[in-house]
Amino acid sequence: MSIAAKANTIWQYANPKKFLATSERVLPFFWATAAICLVVGLVWGFFFTPDDFRQGSTVKIIYLHVPSALMAINCWLMMLVTSLVWLVRRHHVSALAARAAAPIGVVMTLIALVTGAIWGQPMWGTWWAWDPRLTSFLILFLFYLGYIALWEAIEDPDTAADLTSVLCLVGSVFAILSRYAVNFWNQGLHQGASVMRAGAVTGTDTTEKVSNVFFYPLFLCIIGFVLLFIALVLYRTGTEIRARRIRALLARERAGA
Amino acid sequence: MMPDLGKHTEAVLSSYALSLLMLVLLVALSLWRGRKVRAEMEKTEQRMSRNG
């Protein structure tokens, strides 16, 4: 099979029945591996890593702050892709996947903001600063809330999917800004990337990076958050597909009455 | 077993407590709504098939 033909097979999951059957088959794997990675990563990070020579024990917050911040941004990017698929190809499963992902993104953004504030207080001497990265993250959080509110406010699901997709395109600016704000403005309290930097991992980059003693459990936590995100998106998309079917059945019943 | 968190005990423990609480709530609410919607769909399908 050619690469183009293989890529085309992804569209079979636009069929709700096929999507539900496949997701129910793979979900136990994602739930189980997410739980294992998170438990091992967090226990390792919390109980079996030393304090940092500058940050003391607050370095243990990294195992929640970094993975949740990564997922907050990547969740929005996933919503962007599925929204574009909806706008271009009109696959309902795609729009419903974006809708299903939004509350996960809210929680991830909130965890990143809360742990960041708690970490910032002893390190920077303040819970909050109007720093480029913090501010763009707060705006991303507000975009998530607006996105969910828009879905709830519009009765016709296709119109809601259209408008939320456009909102998602606009919000993507802040999702990208929240990742690169430090590089763009080169100011504020928040440090630049010290974990997900190719040179820092391979050793070719000699500027300061996270020590391996912290990086290994952190990497496991990041994998755990990614797997948990996939499990939640698959499960919640299934719920949205069923809710849409209920609405369709009730509409048919009303039309027949 | 509990590591000595020194003067940052409150900061570290509250970070873990709040984050884990939010994650558990997210998973629990997702599962709760998923089960509710699935049961509702089955009920609606049964009713529709009975009524033709």
Image (tube, rainbow, N blue to C red):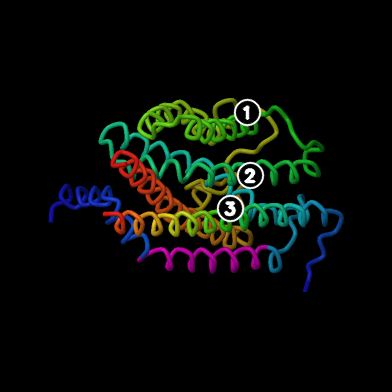
Which residue is located at x 64 percent, y 46 percent?
A111
The answer to whether residue A11 is above or below residue A170 is below
Chain of the residue that carries numbered disc 2 in the rendered image:
A
Which circle marks residue B26 in the picture? 3
**The image quarter in which residue A167 lies:** top left
Question: What range of the chain is rendered magenta?
Answer: A25-45
Chain of the residue that carries numbered disc 1 in the rendered image:
A
Q: Quadrant of the C terminus of chain A?
A: top left
Q: Nearer the viewer, residue A63 or A107?
A: A107
Q: Quick check: is A62 in the magenta stretch?
A: no
Which residue is located at x 54 percent, y 62 percent?
A220
Chain of the residue that carries numbered disc 3 in the rendered image:
B
The answer to whether residue A111 is above or below residue B6 is above
Judging from the image, what secondary structure is the residue with disc 1 in? helix
Q: Dot 1 surroundings within 10 Å: few (below 14), some, or many (20 or more)?
A: many
Magenta span: chief secondary structure: helix
Per the model, the C-alpha gap separating discs 3 and 1 is: 28 Å
The three-letter code of the residue at mark 1 reads Pro
| Mark 2 or mark 1, earlier in chain | 2
Residue A40 shown left or right of residue A125 in the figure: left
Q: Position of residue A156 (x, y in %)?
A: 39, 31
Foreground label between 2 and 1: 2
Name the residue that disc number 1 marks: A132
Q: Nearer the viewer, residue A161 or A157?
A: A157
